[in-house]
Amino acid sequence: MENGINSIAVFGDSILKGAVTGTNSGHLFDIIAENSLALAQRTLGFELNNQSVFGNIISKAQRKFAKMMERGERFDLGIIESGGNDCDYDWPPVSENPFPADISHKPRTTLSDFIRIIDEMTSVMRGNKITPLLMTMPPLVPDWWFEHICAGNNRDNILRFLDGNPHKLYENHERYNIAIVDFARSADVQFVDMRKAMLDAPNYRNLMCKDGIHPNQKGYEYMAEVWVRELPKIKKEF
């Protein structure tokens, strides 16, 4: 690209891996080859090393990134995409007892740890002359996601945990997303606001799988257009 960014490594979860659910394959999920960055690569021509993993949380992404640094691997741009799994809960225990006296149900990654690790990763990238780039979290569809997590679980108990309001799933998701944006601005780290871009679509639900959290094929194609528009604008720091 004209901005000098020719190699990109990605540390993300199922969103940038290209996972779709609700297909006729019989699998819990399928990984499609035409994910958003693979599609953008065809247009922009950068070298892509996608280390995204289904179910990833930020601490696992950090460990994978650290091993790459130990091996001496380098690239122009490092994309960090996480949050959807980090802010999520282990729903079967919540379903069994939403308010146990001796257990406090917590997200898979606390918000403070989430931002701390992002800070550490971006700092290490800069220390190795790699430009860091964050991606905000695509918006979930709270009612669809609520139905998805209730499947096979105690719906009433999960609803109790949410204080009777499934929209709290969106609010919790949004909290982590706001933290990403706040960190990016405070640390002067560039970010692609994928959440805003998808919410700007005429109906973002049409871009999502029925589980409410993964983009569908149209969603990944839409995300690819955002990458094609935004990646050439990224300033290479080194």
Image: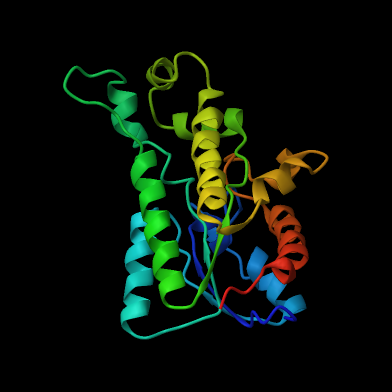
Quadrant housing residue 86: top left
Furthest residue toward left: 102
| Above-or-below relation of 190 to 140 | below
Query: Residue 157 in the image: x percent, y percent?
Result: 37, 18
Choose between 2 and 64: the one closer to the eye: 2
Image quadrant in which you'd find residue 31:
bottom right
Identify which residue, 66 or 23, lies in the foreground.
66
Say which residue appears at 39% left-offset and 28% top-offset.
153
Query: In this orientation, does residue 115 appear?
Result: yes
Q: How is the image coloured?
A: rainbow
Q: Is residue 82 above or below residue 4?
A: above
In which quadrant of the rendered image does the N terminus lie? bottom right
Q: How many marks?
A: 0
- Relative horizontal placement of residue 45, taking residue 175 as reference (left or right): right
Q: Residue at x 63, y 83 (%)?
A: 6
Residue that sits furthest to the right in the current view: 202
> Is residue 108 visible in the rendered structure shown here?
no
Task: Report whether 200 appears left or right of 34.
Answer: right
> The C terminus is located in which quarter?
bottom right
Q: Nearer the viewer, residue 160 or 79?
A: 79
Compared to residue 57, the image places residue 74 above or below, namely below
x and y, in percent, of residue 225 in the image: 77, 62
Residue drawn at x 65%, y 45% is: 195
Where residue 44 appears, as percent x and y from the top left, is 74, 78
- Residue 125 location, quadrant: bottom left
Give coordinates of residue 58: x percent, y percent.
Answer: 39, 55
Q: Is residue 92 left or right of residue 19?
A: left
